[in-house]
Amino acid sequence: MHFASDNTSGAAPEIMAALIRANDGYARSYGADAAMDRVTALLRDLFQSPEAVVHLVATGTAANALAIASHCPPWGAVFCHTHAHVAEDECNAPEFYSGAKLVLVPGNHGKIAAETLGHALATTGEGGVHGVQRGMLTLTNVTEAGTVYSPSEISALTALAKAYDLPCHLDGARFANALAATGASPAEMTWQAGIDVLSLGGTKNGCLGVEAVVFFNPEKAWEFELRRKRGGHLFSKNRFLSAQMEAYLTDGLWLRLATRANAMGQRLAAGLAAKPGVTQAHPVQANMQFPMWPEGTHARLERGGAVYNSIPVAKGREAARLVTSWSTTEADVDSFLAAF
Ligand SMILES: Cc1ncc(COP(=O)(O)O)c(C=O)c1O
């Protein structure tokens, strides 16, 4: 009954087996390993993007912060959702690596509202040399509210940024969950929708610790490499990152794991919907949900052995953030519902 995050799960057996295999013998270091070439080939194929350049890091924060730094000058504004992970949960790493300023753009259910973004873009840079300039756009899919942008919603937002020639980044810590939820192809969800660079998560969805940064516009990839080394995020034994990513992308494992996580989210949401006094703060579309329920429920769930994060909410009500993962079982969900 562990619903605190998808990163409280272990690693999938296929990933661990790949790591054991990768441990045999010798491999070139710092990303020159043969498995890294295979990861690049797999991603180019999956994303129908023959020129894409791929680099690996071990955390989502490094992927986001270094991708942003490679695309935004220090005097630029990084437009992001008010509750974006880059804004609330990365200890200013994006600002640290880029020197840029995050400009928060609100919107319901974790999604940036097009009108608000349009206004923010139009009014930024008006102060001339004295003020912040337009820099780039970053979106998150699955969003921090557990909702999912469709490719056309992403296109609508990137089109606004592209009108000012701004690069667009997608934080895809849960990218596979977004694909599983929408049925969109990787290409439709990214470069065909105006995304220039993607942080493609592995860790939350069954890897031990790896994220791929995929450059659909390879021009910035070399700068990323320099920043990754300078920032201390270049692994000498890169083969252990590439082995994970290769196994993750092979035979559709990434989508199978995400489909499972999403299905368990739906099972949990359906069970909660049948309980008296439960409402969801946001539509449940992938593997993360924010139910609100009557006071006293937390204590009962905790006594029953459930582990999850509660979040502040109005008096008389309690709210939670529940995340299902690749390893969540029907029994986990049903025990939670029984404890409820
Ligand atoms: C949307 C999103 N982006 C990025 C990250 C960063 O991942 P990490 O904790 O590996 O730095 C997370 C992790 O919670 C996340 O939820």
Image (tube, helix red, strand yellow):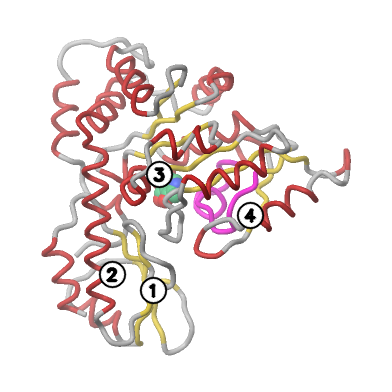
Q: Amino acid at mark 1?
A: Gln
Q: Where 172 falls versus 41 (above or below)?
A: below
Query: Which quadrant is the C terminus positioned in?
Result: bottom left
Query: What label does residue 114 carry, if any?
Result: 4
Marks 2 and 4, the one that precedes in the sequence: 4
Crowding around mark 1 (Cα neighbors within 10 Å: few <14, some 14 to 19, many 20+) is: some
Q: Position of residue 184 (x, y in %)?
A: 38, 43
Marks 1 and 4, the one that precedes in the sequence: 4
Query: What label does residue 308 carry, if any?
Result: none
Q: Amino acid at mark 4?
A: Ala
Q: CA distance from mark 1 to mark 4?
A: 24 Å
Identified at 32% across, 65% down, the residue is: 322
Dot 1 lies on which element? strand
Q: Where 43 falls versus 133 (above or below)?
A: above
Q: CB of residue at label 4: within 8 Å of ligand 1?
A: no
Give the residue at mark 3: 173
Query: What label does residue 269 carry, if any?
Result: 2
Q: Between label 2 and label 3, give the one nearer the viewer.
A: 2
Q: Nearer the viewer, residue 100 or 25?
A: 100
Dot 3 lies on which element? loop
**What stretch of residues is rendered in magenta?**
78-94
Identified at 42% across, 71% down, the residue is: 311
Q: Between label 4 and label 3, give the one nearer the viewer.
A: 4
Give the residue at mark 1: 280
Crowding around mark 4 (Cα neighbors within 10 Å: few <14, some 14 to 19, many 20+) is: some
